[in-house]
Image (spheres, rainbow, N blue to C red):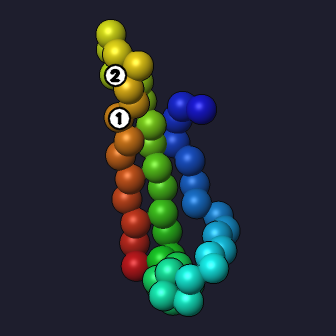
Amino acid sequence: LLGKWIFYAATSDSEEQLKELKTVHSFWVEQTPIPDSEDMFSRFGLKA
């Protein structure tokens, strides 16, 4: 799935990761294909 995705909700079994998730206010990921390759380029940003 290509395009820009908005992070809406998450959960984790790790207490440490849950603490980090609570500090994230905004998160996005953008994926685009690399020409002549089966690989993808992922770009992301987060605002704590």
Q: Amino acid at mark 2?
A: Ile
- Taking the spot 52% from the left edge, 35% from the top edge, the residue there is 3
Between residues 12 and 42, which one lies in front from this camera angle?
12
In the rendered structure, are the residues bearing label 1 and label 2 in contact, judged by CB atoms less than 8 Å apart?
A: yes
Image quarter (top left, top right, bottom left or bottom right) of the N terminus: top right
Quadrant housing residue 10: bottom right
Q: Amino acid at mark 1?
A: Phe
Question: Which numbered dot is residue 30?
Answer: none
- Taking the spot 56% from the left edge, 89% from the top edge, the residue there is 15
Image quarter (top left, top right, bottom left or bottom right) of the C terminus: bottom left
> From this viewpoint, is residue 22 visible?
no
Q: Is residue 5 above or below residue 2?
A: below
Residue that mark 1 sits on: 41
Q: Is residue 36 above or below residue 43?
A: above
Residue 29 image point, x, y percent: 46, 49
Q: Residues within 10 Å of mark 2 (few under 14, many from 20)?
A: few
Helix, strand or loop under label 2? loop
Between residues 41 and 16, which one lies in front from this camera angle?
16
> From this viewpoint, is residue 34 visible?
yes
Residue that mark 2 sits on: 34
Q: Is residue 33 above or below residue 7?
A: above
Distance, label 1 to label 2, CA atoms, is: 6 Å
Q: Is residue 37 above or below residue 27?
A: above
Count of numbered circles on the image: 2
